[in-house]
Image: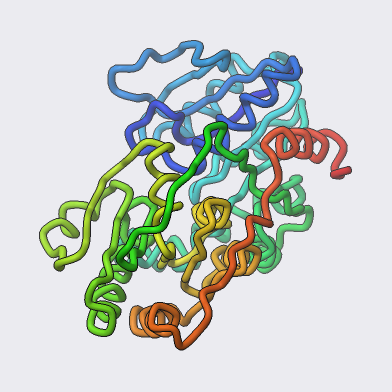
Amino acid sequence: MNILIFNWRDLAHPEAGGAEVYVHSIAREWLAVGHAVSIFSAAVPGKPPREMASGVEVIRRGGKLGVYREARQFWQKEGTNQFDLVVDSVNTRPFLSPSFVDQVPVVAIVYQTAADVWDYETPWPVSWLGRHLLEPRWLRKYRYTPVVTISNSSRQALDVEGLRNVTVIPVGWNPPLWSIEETKEQSPTLLFVGRLSKNKRPQDAVRAFEIVRRSVPDCRLWIVGDGPEANRLHRRLPPGVLLLGKVSDVEKYQRMARAHALISTSVREGWGLVITEAAAMGTPSFAYNVPGLRDSVSAAKGILTDPEPSALAANIISVLTGKSVMPVPSSRGTITWPEVARRIIEFGIDGRVA
């Protein structure tokens, strides 16, 4: 089977994130069972417009906004009769492939709705237009398309938008192939892992940490990740905070194992894979009670708090000072990438998941 994936970026893009990891992970599994996979994404400076990357054909055309127009033109001029399945990976602004692909099945992957993320990432009135007009209008194009999402929170949000054929396929994760044998830090250590962007609210993590340190003076905070908020964070780091930037997977898992708790302060998530990863390393999570995080934290047996730094800090202090019991984490809630890839094809072709 020849499979085409529309995704706004590929892994070579400097702003590649979780969606790109997801897309390349399922592509790798499809290659392993004999399918051919092409990914259509935006152009990347210094990268060729077409190349093979680990067995996947990567086609790069258009910029941040132009990639959507280029995708339609590619399908009309080169895609017809070349592919057996189209996978439409939706990252806020979708490709709207059901409006121009009618010869082969289309399955969409919608990780989450943007909703209040618009308020954090775009200025008014764009935020209002995006949240109340653009995103609902875009999503209506997928009303009867088979849509995969990764949590019950996201499915509920898509139900509200009128999508009628949505299934939840748990997020994929394969445990690391290497052994992680680390002991906890001597001083209470908190960990934040994620893209340093406004919608992830890393400043909330820092504010919560400052409150915690008033009661637990030797507490520390590690921040792993990079993004547009990195410079602003760096200028205002209080004592006890270490900004590590982007690290290797090995170091990420090592720090997860050494930390006493992971904290997550996103506006919303599709799932929150770092919660699952930390739990697998034996580390519980404290997170805001928002869509996506409430799914992953509940599965991992972590602690949900009201979405404000003071509430987050109060729960952390209660555990670190012995007033509450540190939760025992669980790594439930995910399945392997081969299983994710198999279920997506089944749903896309047959409209059902075995």
Residue toward you, 230 or 330: 330
Residue toward you, 281 or 286: 281
Is 53 above or below relative to 276? above
Q: Quadrant of the C terminus?
A: top right
> Whole-percent x and y of residue 343?
78, 39
- Residue 111 in the figure: left or right of residue 188: right
State how many labels appear. Answer: 0
- Residue 274 in the figure: left or right of residue 125: right
Q: Residue at x 28, y 73 (%)?
A: 209
Q: Quadrant of the N terminus?
A: top right
- In which image quadrant can residue 32 be found? top right
> Whole-percent x and y of residue 295?
62, 65
Residue toward you, 273 or 52: 273
Q: Residue at x 27, y 84 (%)?
A: 215
> Whole-percent x and y of residue 325?
53, 80
Is 170 above or below relative to 351? below
Is 106 above or below relative to 83? below
Is 43 above or below relative to 288? above
Q: Residue at x 37, y 40 (%)?
A: 251
